[in-house]
């Protein structure tokens, strides 16, 4: 799952290095605009609906966290 | 550890408060002009319960009343608490303050009416008037009323908040303040005369005559409110309150009427010195006794103060305090006053430059600063030069034609002199003299001089950056009191042209009149004075006829204009002018030389001209056309009812005839080149002494 | 009372004294009392408004919160039943969810309507709307009145006034044409009168939304919520706080800490320095040049716009320093609103450093919910398939951005120029996001080293210039003047005016001008140090006593002597307090 997510993200955002840290949001590597893009691509690709409560730093700070969130929401 | 930390806090705060207070003191302005600083400063040095009379009002009073003279002549203990543009609200506060300190002795309050007719130019004058007042309930209340909101009020309480913006304008006077007294008790002495003021073109005449039919001006509402408080206060504390109006060039009958009504309402006396009889009692002459048209100089103040001294002695409870115990300090002040303040008058009266210098040297704490402009020694006599040598001014005595020169005399000793040789050796670019030095109290002085022979004529004497030199041709002298930081006198002797200054105006004028010098032969200023007096006399004559003559007939009107030379009287008939004439009237006319007029018939046209007292032209006409007479720049027309029904007296393109039925008369002063009066007598309807009409705006 | 009143400082000292005397648990009550007093100095009627609004929010919060818990309870309860009822449970929860949405929206609407009605009351009290006053109970007459003014609507809108004021006037149906200017003025006046309303209403909406999204529980104590709303350092100009972050800090009592109080006071003095010495002086110049625009030329407009930017920054961040400094004395940390904004390299970054709490509010409560809304997702997906990935991604970014910036513009001001301003920034950010790949390609092609100092400086200057252009839109009161002044920069530059000494006649004379510029330079210097991570107050604390005290006294006296206050200065209202 993680590789899939990483590949997807790399494809969508070639300029961002997703593996450079475990605090992507806190370090400012991801801003609100890129987060929207990530949400869009993830929901489109995996067919999930990301509820508002899930949009927190913890879920977006690393690729692992993102992958976990996708898993969770897939059911 | 903790305690030490916490101890730092109070220390920090205390130091902060200290800095705040000090900077507040520094930034607070000190106004030396108009005697502002000394009026308040010296007031608080007065021992309690001494003052019996206090004068309140604006700068007019500051320049007008000398309490020291009141003491000298009548032994009165008075104080001049007037300040520049003092609004009535500030007068109110000062009244409370003077009462607070002198309640046992205060008897009379004289307040000038100038500030009742208008608001001061800026509300900041209120603050200027009371800023240096000591803290008291009255002052706090006043500030509270004045402040627009809490923020305003708090900034008024702390000078730092109020004046912090002055950091850009700090002057040396802010750093060191004057602690001495100047012994004038609130009076500001100036010696300049209005006639010397270059901007005095067409100076206004005194009002002299009051017009009771005018509309009273509206008095400023806020001023009235505070005036009411003053009245109640005086009533409550049994103080005698008097209204006054010093002679100025901007008063009017309307304003007088308004103040008169106000005074009547409160049953207080009002003395208006702009009108007869008071202006006559003062023998006041605007051009000589005012300094700028509004404020009195020392000559006017002398008369004004004298009048008040006499009045207070006879009409108030103020007593003669000379020799009384507790009032000895006034004697000491009087001596100091004579020395300091009267020195200025003495100097102004000096005719001879050497006498001037000698007298200036003798003044205590004086710095005599001299600079030549253009040319300064060509007319000096040998005696004068000898005196200068004796006084240590050798270089001045030997100064060459059109040379530059500066000198400094301190406390009677010549400190230095510099002439052209010093200028040349200094290698200035323009061969002028320029020198900088310090006075004993650290005032910075810069003096410059340039004679015409070596460049553009110029002179300058500045103390702490302020220019005091008159910069006129001759020897410019500034006498500076370095202890009090004030200029005693600044003048210029045109010793290029004449060794002596002209005598004062009164002397010269009297001299010229006695000699019968014609106006054209007088010098410029004297002629101005002469013409001004003529206009004033004319106006007095007109007014007196209007208000005082027992019978206002054609004859009484005509009398003054034919008994002196220099007038031309034009008579032009309109409509009908004969029906009411009696035999006596006609005889009178015949007696005056008006032969044709004495024979005037029903609806006749008539033109008569009396020149220098004798009839020079008459024309009587019964025809159907109006008649005309034309002279240089004037045209007279007359037409009876059937002959055009017209009357016209055109002089220099302006119409002066009243154009009423009857005799239209216009009198013209040839020397002043202006119309003095225009009147019309309806001798158809009424006897010659009953129906007349005057025109007010003919001048 | 505003921060620059003389009484504010004694007020704060008194509040501090009471705060630290009271027992720990009761300290928040002391804060509440002082905040109430502070707010009441603005007028007792506004106090009633805020009490009412807080009450509605408090009630709504509790209701939503209880429904949240019911839903969870019900779900748990249902889990033990048969599986077939799982579906029933889902539709049940969906219905409940819809209920909650309705509830949430209605709470929001009530708040807004109350605000709106409140502003009308002022106008009614001022007697401008006689028909409405008489027909408060008679709706027929009111409707008749409205219909009668339809012809006026076109006239009003084309007359060049703001669209909202035209709508406003139309709704209240006043017929007297001569009242227009007076009413417009009173509209503007009463719109700005309810103090701080724009800030605390946003805070409360955020609070309700957070409860709805289960990010926090409702505040059960009305008075604690009231304290959050009225807390006096932040009531006037923000920051727009989140209840879940600041609420607990307000309520727990803090112990006295000497260092913290000292730092807080220092920050307050620094805030006054920025506000009084820089911002208020510059406001004279800016007002003179733009207020009296016919008398000035392009170069002066440019100068005034640049200085107007400095003024706005110093004014607003100065107030933030005062607010946060005062709060720090109490031990309550509020959110930062500024973080060296002129060090931003991009427009998006700028709005993460300028008025931070507003940006965060819009991000959390408008942008994100829009982004994840199903409808938007669907359209975005549609575009993705039909046109391409990039189109879909851009759509998902641009549409929410557009909404956010329109609303941001409106929040700042109720006129066409603010709308344009919102559109301007929205367009800038959208364009920079949409064309990001192209820009990267361009810089690569031009072989520009994006990490070099020079390039970063270029980017920072660019951001500054873009902000200055934005100021051209908002400083003058109308678009016509904005256009005129912006045009003059090119058509009538007259650079000589800048050097012939006439800049010292534009409202501040040369001594003040020099002082202001030096002060601004100092602020810039301190900011650059902050950006590099230096903590100024700690740096000062590490110096020996004499140096420390010299610095403190210097700044305090700089404020007291050079500050624009006292008689002779207009009471310059804080730029952002009108919201």
Image: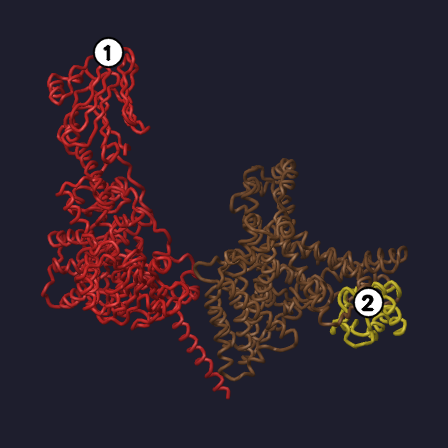
Chain colours: A yellow, B red, C brown
The residue at the far top in this view is B623
Q: Which mark is residue C444?
A: 2
The chain letter under disc 1 is B
Q: Secondary structure at mark 2?
A: helix
Residue B265 position in % (x across, y down): 23, 44
- Comparing B663 with C137, the one in front is B663
Report the residue at 29% width, 73% height from top.
Answer: B440
Q: Quadrant of residue A49?
A: bottom right
Asked if one can make out residue C343 in the rendered structure from this viewpoint, the answer is yes
> Residue B630, located in which quarter of the rendered image?
top left
B179 on left or right of A60? left
On the same chain, marks 1 and 2? The answer is no
Q: Residue at x 51, y 64 (%)?
A: C38
From the viewer's perspective, is C461 left or right of B483? right
Q: Position of residue C446 (x, y in %)?
A: 80, 65
Q: Secondary structure at mark 1?
A: loop
């Amino acid at each position: 799952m993680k590789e899939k997510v990483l590949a997807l993200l790399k494809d969508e955002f070639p300029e961002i290095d997703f593996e450079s840290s475990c605090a992507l949001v806190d370090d400012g590597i991801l801003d609100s605009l890129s987060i929207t893009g990530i949400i869009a691509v993830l929901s489109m690709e995996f067919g999930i609906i990301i509820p508002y409560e899930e949009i927190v730093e913890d879920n977006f700070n690393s690729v692992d966290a993102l992958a976990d969130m996708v898993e969770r929401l897939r059911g | 550890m903790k305690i030490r930390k916490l101890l730092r806090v109070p220390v920090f705060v205390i130091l902060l408060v200290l800095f705040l207070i000090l900077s507040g003191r520094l930034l607070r302005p000190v106004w030396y002009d108009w005697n502002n600083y000394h009026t308040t400063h010296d007031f608080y040095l007065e021992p309690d319960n001494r003052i019996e009379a206090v004068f309140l009002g604006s700068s007019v009073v500051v320049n007008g009343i000398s309490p020291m003279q009141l003491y000298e002549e009548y032994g009165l203990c008075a104080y001049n608490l007037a300040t520049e543009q003092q609004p009535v609200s500030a007068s109110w506060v000062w009244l409370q303050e003077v009462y607070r300190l002198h309640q046992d002795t205060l008897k009379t309050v004289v307040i000038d009416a100038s500030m009742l007719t208008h608001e001061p130019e800026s509300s900041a004058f209120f603050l200027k008037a009371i800023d240096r007042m000591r803290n008291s309930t009255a002052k706090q209340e006043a500030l509270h009323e004045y402040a627009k909101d809490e923020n305003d009020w708090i900034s008024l309480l702390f000078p730092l908040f109020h004046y912090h913006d002055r950091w850009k304008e700090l002057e040396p006077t802010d750093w060191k303040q004057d602690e001495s007294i100047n012994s004038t008790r609130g009076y500001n002495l100036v010696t300049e005369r209005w006639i010397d003021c270059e901007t005095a073109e067409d100076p206004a005449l005194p009002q002299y005559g009051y017009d009771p039919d005018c509309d009273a001006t509206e008095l400023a509402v806020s001023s009235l409110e505070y005036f009411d408080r003053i009245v109640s206060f005086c009533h409550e504390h049994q103080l005698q309150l008097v209204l006054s109006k010093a002679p100025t060039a901007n008063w009017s009958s309307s304003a007088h009427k308004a103040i008169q009504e106000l005074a009547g309402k409160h049953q207080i006396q009002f003395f208006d010195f702009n009108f007869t009889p008071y202006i006559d009692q003062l023998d006041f002459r605007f051009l000589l006794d005012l300094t700028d048209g509004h404020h009195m100089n020392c000559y006017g103040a002398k008369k004004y103060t004298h009048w008040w001294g006499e009045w207070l002695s006879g009409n108030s409870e103020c007593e003669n305090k000379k020799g009384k115990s507790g009032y000895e300090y006034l004697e000491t002040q009087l001596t100091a006053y004579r020395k300091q303040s009267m020195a200025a008058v003495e100097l102004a009266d000096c005719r001879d430059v050497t006498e001037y210098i000698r007298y200036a040297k003798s003044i205590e704490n004086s710095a005599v600063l001299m600079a030549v402009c253009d040319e300064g020694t060509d007319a000096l006599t040998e005696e004068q030069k000898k005196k200068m040598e004796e006084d240590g001014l050798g270089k001045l005595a030997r100064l060459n034609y059109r040379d530059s020169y500066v000198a400094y005399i301190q406390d009677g000793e010549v400190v230095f002199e510099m002439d052209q040789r010093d200028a040349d050796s200094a290698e200035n670019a323009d061969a002028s003299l320029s020198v900088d030095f310090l006075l004993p109290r650290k005032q910075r002085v810069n003096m410059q001089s340039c004679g015409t022979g070596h460049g553009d004529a110029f002179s300058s004497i500045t103390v702490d950056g302020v220019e005091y030199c008159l910069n006129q041709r001759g020897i410019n002298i500034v006498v500076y009191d370095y202890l009090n930081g004030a200029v005693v006198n600044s003048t210029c002797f045109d010793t290029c042209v004449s060794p002596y200054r002209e005598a004062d105006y009164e002397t010269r004028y009297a001299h010229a009149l006695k000699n019968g010098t014609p106006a054209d032969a007088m010098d410029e200023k004297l002629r101005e004075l002469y013409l001004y007096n003529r206009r004033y006399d004319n106006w007095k004559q007109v007014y007196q006829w209007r208000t005082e003559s027992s019978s206002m007939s054609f004859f009484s009107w005509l009398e003054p204009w034919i008994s002196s030379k220099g007038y031309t009287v034009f008579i032009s008939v309109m409509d009908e002018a004969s029906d009411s004439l009696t035999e006596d009237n006609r005889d009178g006319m015949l007696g005056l030389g008006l032969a044709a007029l004495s024979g005037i018939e029903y609806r006749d046209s008539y033109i008569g001209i009396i020149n220098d007292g004798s009839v020079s032209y008459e024309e009587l006409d019964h025809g159907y056309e109006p008649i005309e007479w034309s002279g240089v720049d004037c045209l007279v027309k007359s037409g009876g009812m059937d002959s055009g029904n017209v009357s016209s007296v055109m002089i220099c393109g302006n119409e002066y005839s009243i154009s009423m039925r009857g005799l239209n008369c216009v009198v013209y002063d040839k020397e002043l080149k202006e119309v003095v009066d225009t009147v019309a007598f309806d001798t158809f309807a009424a006897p010659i002494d009953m129906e007349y009409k005057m025109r007010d705006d003919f001048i | 009372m505003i921060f620059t009143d003389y009484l504010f400082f004694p007020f704060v000292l008194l509040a501090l004294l009471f705060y630290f005397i009271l027992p720990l648990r009761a300290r928040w009550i002391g804060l509440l009392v002082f905040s109430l007093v502070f707010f009441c100095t603005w007028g007792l009627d506004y106090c009633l408004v805020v009490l009412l609004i807080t009450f509605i929010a408090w009630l709504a919060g509790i209701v939503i919160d209880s429904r949240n818990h019911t839903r969870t309870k019900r779900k748990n309860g249902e889990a033990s039943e048969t599986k077939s009822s799982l579906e029933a449970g889902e539709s049940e929860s969906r219905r409940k969810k819809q209920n909650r949405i309705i509830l949430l929206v209605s709470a929001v609407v009530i708040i807004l309507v109350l605000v709106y009605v409140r502003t009308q009351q002022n106008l009614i009290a001022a007697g401008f709307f006689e028909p409405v006053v008489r027909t408060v109970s008679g709706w027929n007459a009111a409707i008749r009145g409205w219909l009668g003014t339809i012809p006026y609507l076109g006239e009003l809108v084309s007359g060049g006034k703001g669209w909202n004021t035209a709508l406003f006037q139309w709704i209240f149906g006043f017929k007297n044409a001569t009242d227009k200017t007076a009413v417009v003025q009173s509209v503007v006046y009463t719109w700005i009168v309810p103090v701080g309303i724009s800030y605390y209403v946003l805070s409360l909406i955020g609070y309700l939304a957070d409860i709805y999204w289960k990010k926090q529980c409702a505040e059960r104590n009305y008075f604690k919520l009231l304290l959050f709303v009225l807390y006096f350092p932040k009531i006037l100009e923000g920051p727009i706080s989140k209840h879940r972050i600041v609420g607990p800090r307000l309520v727990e009592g803090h112990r006295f800490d000497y260092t913290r109080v000292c730092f807080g006071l220092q920050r307050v003095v620094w805030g006054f320095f920025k506000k009084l010495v820089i911002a208020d002086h510059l406001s004279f110049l800016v007002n003179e040049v733009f207020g009296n625009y016919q008398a000035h030329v392009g170069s002066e407009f440019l100068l005034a716009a640049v200085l107007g930017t400095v003024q706005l920054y110093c004014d607003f961040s100065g107030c933030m320093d005062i607010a946060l400094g005062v709060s720090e004395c109490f031990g309550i940390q509020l959110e930062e609103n500024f973080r060296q904004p002129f060090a931003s390299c991009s427009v998006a970054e700028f709005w993460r450093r300028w008025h931070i709490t507003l940006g965060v509010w819009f991000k959390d409560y408008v942008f994100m919910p829009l982004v994840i809304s199903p409808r938007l997702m669907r359209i975005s997906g549609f575009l993705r398939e039909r046109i391409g990935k990039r189109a879909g991604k851009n759509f998902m970014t641009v549409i929410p951005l557009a909404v956010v910036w329109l609303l941001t513009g409106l929040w700042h001001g109720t006129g066409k120029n603010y709308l344009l301003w919102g559109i301007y920034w929205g367009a800038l950010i959208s364009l920079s996001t949409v064309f990001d790949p192209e820009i990267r390609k361009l810089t690569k092609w031009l072989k520009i080293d994006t990490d070099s100092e020079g390039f970063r400086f270029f980017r920072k200057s660019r951001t500054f210039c873009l902000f200055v252009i934005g100021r051209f839109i908002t400083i003058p009161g109308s678009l016509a003047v904005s256009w005129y002044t912006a045009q003059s920069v090119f058509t009538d530059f007259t650079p000589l005016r800048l050097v012939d000494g006439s800049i010292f006649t534009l409202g501040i004379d040369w001594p003040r001008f020099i002082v202001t510029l030096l002060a601004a330079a100092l602020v810039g210097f301190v900011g650059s140090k902050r950006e590099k991570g230096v903590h100024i107050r700690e740096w000062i604390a590490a110096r020996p006593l004499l140096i420390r005290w010299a610095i403190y006294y210097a700044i305090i006296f700089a404020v007291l002597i050079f500050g624009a206050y006292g008689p002779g200065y207009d009471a310059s209202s804080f730029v952002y307090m009108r919201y």
